[in-house]
Image (cartoon, rainbow, N blue to C red):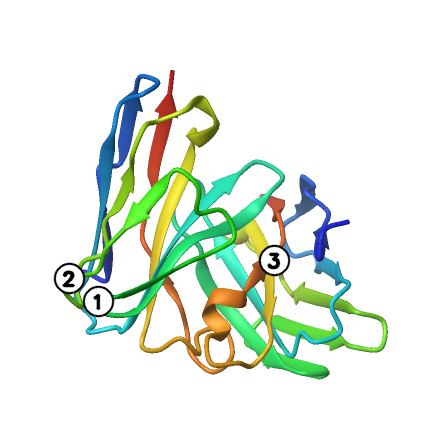
Amino acid sequence: QKEVEQDPGPLSVPEGAIVSLNCTYSNSAFQYFMWYRQYSRKGPELLMYTYSSGNKEDGRFTAQVDKSSKYISLFIRDSQPSDSATYLCAMTRLSYSSASKIIFGSGTRLSIRP
Amino acid sequence: NAGVTQTPKFQVLKTGQSMTLQCAQDMNHEYMSWYRQDPGMGLRLIHYSVGAGITDQGEVPNGYNVSRSTTEDFPLRLLSAAPSQTSVYFCASSFSSLAGATETQYFGPGTRLLVL
């Protein structure tokens, strides 16, 4: 079983819809949770990160962590065609080398229809 | 700032050939890493470096070598290419090895490698 599971999609929604992207994980030691956006043939770019449980909002994006259920979500409000990309969840635990312990989900491909 | 740059963008190799994927960053970042991205597998860490002269293995290091002689450059060497190394390779950097916890990790545009 993978440490981080993510539905690959593709997910297609009309412009203006609310999008929900999700990941589940098995390692309860994870404390930091990230969402990356990756456009086609580009490198991933960090969208948001959260620590432990709770919500974090940044413009149209909201990241949610439920550590009791080992479940994280990314919500996109008022979705735009420019949001069409692959979204990767990622997580790690705090250590001397947290970066080398980041585990990535396989990504969900999202398409926003105009 | 150019950020993280990678060359080449695309490469075709024959089985058994060797090559070096180049990565450079101009942000004075101490931490650099190499990932490979395969369909359905997510990003997997190959090797990483916490500073010049210091490297370590990640999750999938076999068949790859790295060195870090300067802060800016972190090349990845394929010793004897195999079809299983067909993938997209990403280099990344961050200010320190706490990326993911308290810092952002920046990725390059990737190198697409096809091994025949």
> Split into 4 quadrants, where in the image is the C terminus of chain A?
top right
The spot of residue A99 in percent (x, y) is 46, 70
Write down the chain letter for disc 3: A
x 73%, y 53%: residue: A5
x 17%, y 64%: residue: B72
Which quadrant of the figure has residue B16? Answer: top left
Query: Which circle marks residue A79 in the picture?
Result: 3
Q: Nearer the viewer, mark 2 or mark 3?
A: 2
The spot of residue A100 in percent (x, y) is 47, 66
Which quadrant of the figure has residue B82? Answer: top left
Of residues B92 and A20, the one nearer the viewer is: B92
The spot of residue B90 in percent (x, y) is 37, 48
Of residues A22 and A33, the one nearer the viewer is: A33
Does mark 3 fall on the same chain as mark 1? no
Does mark 3 fall on the same chain as mark 2? no
Q: Amino acid at mark 1?
A: Gly
Q: Which residue is mark 2?
A: B69
Check if mark 2's residue and mark 1's residue have beta carbons within 8 Å.
yes
Does mark 1 fall on the same chain as mark 2? yes
Q: Secondary structure at mark 2?
A: loop
Label whose residue precedes the other's in the sequence (2 or 1)? 1
Q: Amino acid at mark 3?
A: Ser
Disc 1/disc 3 C-alpha distance (Å): 45 Å
